[in-house]
Image (cartoon, grey):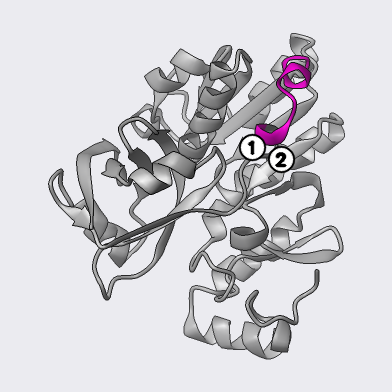
Amino acid sequence: MYPILKAEKLAEKIYLMVVKAPRVAKNCQPGEFIIVKIDEVGERIPLTICDYNREEGTVTIVFQIVGGSTERMADLKAGDAFHDFVGPLGNPSEFVHEDIESLKNKKMLFVAGGVGTAPVYPQVKWLHEHGIDVDVIVGAKNKDLLILEEEMKAVAGNLYITTDDGSYVRKGMVTDVIKDLVNVEGKKYDVCVAIGPMIMMKFVCLLTKELEIPTIVSLNPIMVDGTGMCGACRVTVGDKVKFACVDGPEFDGHLINFDEAMKRQQMYKTEEGRAILKLREGNTHHGGCGNCND
């Protein structure tokens, strides 16, 4: 069992939990995820790691209520425990393996949308701890749905906040802020990392492609099973079929077919849709069949 040390409501339907999981905390890196199960018969829920403390053996997760299982999770309190807490899974962010001195010469921009702020935070924190300051844009529908503001302020070189309705700091989409930074302030970036809803990442990538800024996105929002077996997170990257949970979750955003991925995401929500996908894709339906494209 994995005890919950802290359970906190961050915003409407958004919760944070600190979980005692020493082996995961010892080995995890920014960009990776874990899978939790509430009890022996519970649904497997993949969640990106928001933070970790190796000395205390804790891992922080942030999740949003989207169905019955996450609704049950929201009812858990400090003192309760998860039956399973498996990880780290997926691949860490690419910069973790890069030369630190080379990274210090890069101008990096991070763009977080909604709950995507949670997986952006450990990446920015890791860079800050290695002496690298980056620009961060955080977008939310309104002030009440903004999360981890103070935590992000503590690690970001420059933090830019925007809200769709203008209820806090400024009004507009994250893409509006990117345009201002590049076209008005004259900033130049070597790479952009964008994490948030699929539609947000799509439009960020359309803009950064136009601005010629290489962009990495995380496809953790489309993961379901987390092992490559269910086929929910199958996505076309360039001319290859990939699975977010085993090949990612991070990919070159300019190569992703977002429209196909979002359509598939909607189809996968229904039993009829899953049957259609299985029929169309045959032996390449899931990542564990051994017949998928390399």
Res. 19 image quadrant: top left
Task: Give the mark, 2 or 1, whose residue is nearer the N terminus.
Answer: 1
Rate crowding at label 1 as few (under 14), some (14 to 19) or many (20 or more) other CA atoms within 10 Å.
many
Secondary structure beneath dot 1 equals strand
Q: Position of residue 214 (x, y in %)?
A: 81, 35
* Extent of the magenta region: 96-105
Query: Residue 162: horizontal and vertical position, in percent?
Result: 52, 24
Q: Is residue 119 magenta?
A: no
The one of 129 and 141 positioned closer to us in this rendering: 129
93 in relation to 90, above or below: above
Q: Which residue is mark 2?
A: 216
Give percent across and percent down for residue 103: 73, 21
Residue shown at 18% from the left, 52% from the top: 76
Q: Are marks 2 and 1 in contact (CB under 8 Å)?
A: yes
Residue at label 1? 194
Q: Give the camera-side residue of 158 and 77.
A: 77
Residue 217 image position (x, y, % from top left): 67, 44
Q: Is residue 88 above or below residue 270?
A: above
Answer whether residue 39 is visible to the viewer in this image: yes
| Residue at mark 2 to residue at mark 1: CA–CA distance | 6 Å
Q: Tell me the kind of residue under disc 1.
A: Ala
Within the image, what quadrant is residue 228 found in? bottom right
